[in-house]
Amino acid sequence: MELRPIIKTRKSGFEDAFFVIAIIFTIVIFLVILAKVWGDIYPTLSDSLTSATPDGDTTFNVSSTFEGVDSTITMFDKLFPLVLIGLFGFVLIGASIYAEHPIMLFLGLIILAVVILLAVIYANIYNQITQTEQFSETTSDFGISNIFMRYLPYVLFLMFIAIGAVVLWSRSKAGTSL
């Protein structure tokens, strides 16, 4: 009887780009909606908890706790480029493992076109959501994410070019051909 490996090896490839674009869109939309919901419930919750706190000397300060939550939500905007770098590395590792047949170049170009089309759609959906009256104040706190989402097709196109350049460079150093 032969033991089979528990974890099967998986060839990564072009489909990882769809994963990346879905993750980027999901993270940004989630953070904007979370900030909007928190901004809506913050005043009522703060007033309720402040009035429910017993009078006198307490060590629990409701307003400073809530301000910490608010600043933590907007802190994720500053970490968004790190998420992009991590996803870029994920796709780069997957692309370096992919098959070396020349037809993969044409398949990659077709998938690049589809990913750019999806990026345009996601960027337009994000702009439609954030330009509504309800979200206009909330999105002003997310400067970095707004820039990335506004230029998402260009970011992904540059990411594809960079990944292709790194993979081609690494294969030329290793002595393998495309």
Image (tube, rainbow, N blue to C red):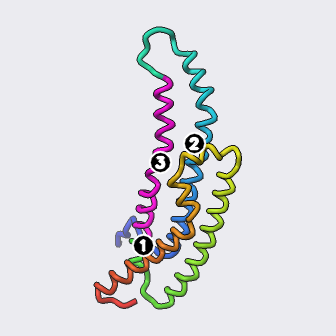
**Horizontally, is 108 left or right of 134 in the view?**
left
Tell me which amino acid carries mark 3: Phe
In the image, is residue 28 part of the stretch drawn in magenta?
no
Residues shaded magenta: 62-91
Residue type marked 1: Gly
Question: With respect to residue 156, does 57 lie above or below?
Answer: above
Q: Dot 2, how many residues are within 10 Å of its Cα: few (below 14), some (14-19), or many (20+)? A: many
Residue to which mark 1 is pinned: 94
C-alpha separation, residue under disc 2 versus residue under disc 1: 33 Å
Q: Earlier in the sequence, mark 2 or mark 3?
A: 2
Magenta: main secondary structure? helix
Q: Quadrant of residue 134?
A: top right
Residue 56 sits above or below residue 110 on the image: above
Label 2 sits on residue: 35
Residue 88: quarter of image:
bottom left
Quadrant showing the C terminus: bottom left
Q: Are marks 2 and 3 in contact (CB under 8 Å)?
A: no
Residue 87: say if magenta.
Answer: yes
